[in-house]
Image (cartoon, rainbow, N blue to C red):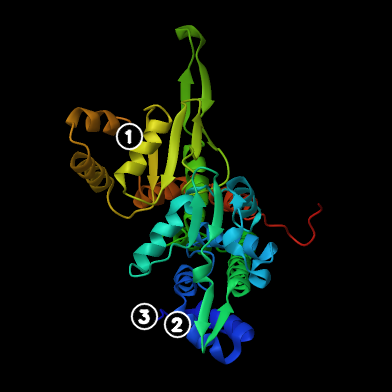
Amino acid sequence: MIIMEHQFTNTIEEILKKHFGKNSTDIFEKSHLLQYINLKTKSANKGAKARGSFANLYAIYVVVEDYLTKGFDKKGNYSKYKGIEFTKLFKRQRELPFGAKLQNHALNNRMNSEFQKFFPSTEYTPILRNLETNRYWINDSLIEIKVAEKVHNIAKAIIEIIDEYAKIKKGAFEQFVQSCLELQEVQKKNPKEVKKFIFSLLAPNVDARLFEIVSYAILKFYYHDQKIYWGFELDKLQKDNLVLYKTGRTNANDGGIDFVMKPLGRFFQVTETLDVKKYFLDIDKIHKFPITFVVKSQDTRKNILSTIKKNALRIYSVKDVVKRYMSCIEEIINIQCIYKCFLEAEKQGYLKDILDEIILQSKVEFNYQEDDDED
């Protein structure tokens, strides 16, 4: 197999050379697991806007780390090990950088499934698990690579590679926040530069976390001055502004509700997929309560709805079922719609507020601390 090369590939090769010297190239070429990690780390040097890939990498990381912690790279006998409990792996991956909101999908199947897609001819599954005991192992056949009649264990190299990837991504996000802070200083003198920067964060290839943060900041101030009159008696109505709340940290795969609007009680879910099963799953999770989808797509809202419905009719044979689900989609907000909301909010004088909100949410999301911040 020809190894796909990108900027971080050089880092992988340097780490392997440090561990294995002249055998490093042969080990890289023979190891499907290293090649998979290489594929998953291509965003490392593309800055904060490029989407990171932590879930599947951390699934590998935590089981390999357990293997090393227990000393199996030195003492062997891994086949007799009873495995590590899922709860410990799950806790550990959430302690890692950008891992705070990761779910169980990668550990349970998603990583193995994607690995198989990239390497269909291999007979080995990377993460092994016992469904009865809920214990896990790394497949040591994939971390012991034979070159020149000698078996080389790549476990430590894997940990170092993924650590370096996380370090680079963390640095990129810290630089992103610093760029925002610098723009905060010049926004009065150069609002066009701020506007251009915010628009750049709404591109389809931008990291899902940043898209969610920027979408929230824009929509929050777009709705900010819109008023609603409500009450239980006609002569006792009260006037309130629409307020958009963010329900927690960003995560494209956590299945939760991303934004909630008061006093209307509207739910918003941010997504970057047109997979109809994902939409219907979100609708099921809130018992078919109406939901607005904020979609990271430049396609028209009409086409997005049409695609969802078309795929739904293909998968679900009963039209009434599809109709019921489709009726729960209250609104589609695409990138073009967010642009318009931004221009309207800017016209109302909220450019600085939007940038301030992006900075605030980014600091929370990426655990960013300025040097002079107190504990």
Residue, x 55% and y 53% (percent of image)? 136
Eye-nearest disc, 1 or 3: 3
* Residue corresponding to mark 1: 329
Mark 2 and mark 3 residues within 8 Å of each other at the beta carbon: yes
Of residues 188 and 322, the one drawn nearer to the viewer in this rendering: 322
* Residue corresponding to mark 3: 1
Name the residue type under label 1.
Ile
Estimate the spatial distance between the alpha carbons at disc 1 and disc 2, rounded to whole Å: 48 Å
How many residues crowd around disc 1 within 10 Å: few (fewer than 14), some, or many (20 or more)? some
11 sits to left or right of 341: right
Q: Earlier in the sequence, mark 1 or mark 2?
A: 2
Name the residue type under label 2.
Glu
Q: Element type at marker 2? A: helix
Q: Element type at marker 3? A: loop
Mark 1 and mark 3 residues within 8 Å of each other at the beta carbon: no
278 to 25, vertically: above or below: above
Residue 84: x, y in percent? Answer: 61, 52
Residue, x 38% and y 41% (percent of image)? 293
Residue 208: x, y in percent? Answer: 47, 55
The residue sitting at the bottom extreme is 22
Q: Element type at marker 1? A: strand
Of residues 228 and 12, the one drawn nearer to the viewer in this rendering: 12
Of residues 286 and 1, the one drawn nearer to the viewer in this rendering: 1
Residue, x 59% and y 56% (percent of image)? 98
Estimate the spatial distance between the alpha carbons at disc 1 and disc 3, rounded to whole Å: 44 Å
Labelled disc at residue 244: none
Mark 1 and mark 2 residues within 8 Å of each other at the beta carbon: no
Of residues 214 and 196, the one drawn nearer to the viewer in this rendering: 214
Does residue 242 appear in this view?
A: no
* Residue corresponding to mark 2: 29
